Amino acid sequence: MRKFFLYLIGLVLSSGTVLLGKDIEGQVPDSLLTEAYISSIHLIDPYRAINLLEHAERRGSIPDFRINILKSMVYQGQSWFSLALPCSEKAFASDSVQRSPVLYARATRLLSDIYFRLGRYEEAIRYALLQMENADKMGDVGDKASALFLISKGQRFLSHKEEAYQTAGKAVTLLESSSDIRQLALLSYFYGELSRFLDIDSRVRDALDVCVKREKLIARMDKMKGAPVGYVDQQYGYLYSKMSMFYKTLGEDTLARAYFRKYESTQYASTVKGSVEAHPYWLATHNYERVLDNSRRVAAGVFRGDTINQDYRGLLRDQAEAYAGLGDVISAMIYKDRESVILDSLYARDKGNALSELSVIYQTKEREALIGSQEKELRQQRLLLVASLALTGLLLTLLWIIMRNQRIVRSKNRAMALQIDKLMSCEETIGKMKRRDSSSTVFSPSPNPNNYEDLFDRISTVIKDEKLFLDTQLSRDRVLEVVHMNRTLFGKVLQECAKTNFSDYVNTLRVEYSVRLMRQHPDYTIDSIAMDSGFNSPRTYYRVFKEKLNMTPAEYRKAISE
């Protein structure tokens, strides 16, 4: 249903765009249908850029290969990589691009980046290699280094980490002796990415070695002309904040403090954005109040309106960690919940972007068929638009109901999980009290058959203490041998005190034990928990768990993790 819903939204948006395009056909001046103008607006007004490119294509005012390059740039700028890919491939295949080294370099850069963004790393590497070959012919060291570094990132994502580090090293070597400020800025970026990857791989000492090289590089750039105002200071500030944390991670507190002071001496550290780089160090040194004070300052100065972004989410995460460090659990939970809200909003926005991409995809596929359509076809499209809007409204209502019900179920599951935990905690406390009170009591081989409660305590204690219920082959006869009781009396005791039979009682104990396992071992799979709890199969475990707790094991696990 979800795919169908997205398809209808795309249909509505595409139909609207087509109808609008037909209404303004012939009214766009030629001065707007130029490569220079469309390039200037492709990031700030992508929909208008696409509309103008459609007009330019119909009028033939821009060559097809350039139109495909421009379309790819527009789609890439909006992260619509599935749309950007065919446009880039068409441009790359054209004779004009194949004959021009400059255009060839541009097309291969586009393709390698798009394939990388799509997670198709083998194809990304293939086009990056073509980019390298072309860069060699042109003598463009910077372009070759960029291609090499992209190859290294592709190798990393393909789990060839050592090869990735070697390839990245080659890219770095190409630029280390350069005197071009732009190539040195690119090298600084390479160093930053390398140190980040090394930190992820727990190679903190190696990451520091790279940072030292970057520090020397920034010093070189500081003596050169051409760097934007504030660039060198920003590079220093960012670098020193990372180095202070690396030294802190290695336990070298003196050096960590020294580099943090260097960070504080930069103008970048006093800016609103740059001050956030101090948070990891403050948190690591338990300076929680400074994190909270600075977070409030940053939030007031930067995020007055737009809070739906990863930067604001990181700020909330820092505040939650700071409150937790101060022992203010309630405030920590509040900020953690706010972070979750931002994450949900980001997810919703991503879905909106995907919907927009779907709309453009539909428009692109239908473009040629819609050009030259007759008035009758146009009336049919307008009728379809009205019907689609009505159906979309209905589906939106249904989707809202489904999402609302899902929220209610999740809330109910969390409440039930909390109640289950409390009940089990109470049962464990009562069990401990009973065992303490009866620690000196020895079971009589001939118990009073009328004292059902004592008999039940005896049965329960034996089964729980010896964990007989974990035996998948546990039978009634085995328990009877252990508790020295006849079958009739045993059944009466269970029915009277537990209101159930032997099999159901044992399954109850197994479910309770599985709940503890899920709490203690959140990394265990549901299937392994089922087998460890004494069930014959995961299927039986799911059925019994659902019967006992009115939710599935997966739902319970999700409830306790939220």
Image: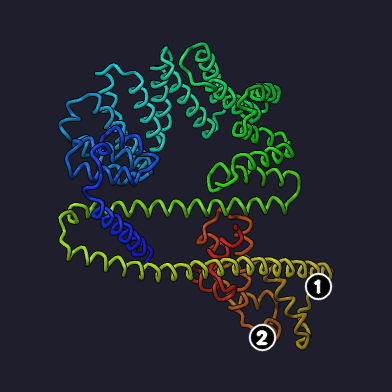
Q: Is the residue marked by circle 2 packed among few (<14), some (14-19), or many (20+) residues within 10 Å?
A: some
- Colour setting: rainbow
Residue 199 in the figure: left or right of residue 270: left
Drawn side of residue 201 relative to residue 423, left or right: left
Q: Nearer the viewer, residue 328 or 512?
A: 328
Which of 174 and 444 lies nearest the eye of the viewer? 174
Q: Which label was assigned to residue 331?
A: none
Disc 1 secondary structure class: loop
- Say few, some or many: other residues with alpha carbon within 10 Å of mark 1 (under 14 / 14 to 19 / 20 or more): few
User: How far is disc 1 from disc 2 in space, using C-alphas?
Assistant: 24 Å
Callout 2, which amino acid?
Gln
- The quadrant of the rendering that contains the C terminus is bottom right
Q: Is residue 288 above or below residue 374?
A: above
Q: Residue at x 48, y 18 (%)?
A: 227
- Res 354 seen here: yes
Q: In the figure, 548 relative to 347: above or below?
A: below
Instruction: Tell me the quarter of the image containing the N terminus.
Output: bottom left
Count of picture labels:
2
Residue drawn at (60%, 60%) of the image: 518
Q: Do the residues bearing badges 1 and 2 touch, measured as CB atoms within 8 Å?
A: no
Report x, y in % for residue 277. Answer: 61, 32
The correct choice, above or below, for 285 with respect to 315 in the image is above
The residue positioned 66% from the left and 66% from the top of the image is: 418
Residue bearing mark 1: 442
Residue 250 visible, this orientation: no
> Percent x, y for residue 34?
25, 35
Q: Nearer the viewer, residue 77 or 89?
A: 77
Q: Quadrant of residue 480?
A: bottom right
Counting from the top left corner in percent of width and height, residue 470 is at 60, 66
Q: Which kind of residue does numbered mark 1 sit on?
A: Val
Q: Which mark is residue 495?
A: 2
Q: Earlier in the sequence, mark 1 or mark 2?
A: 1
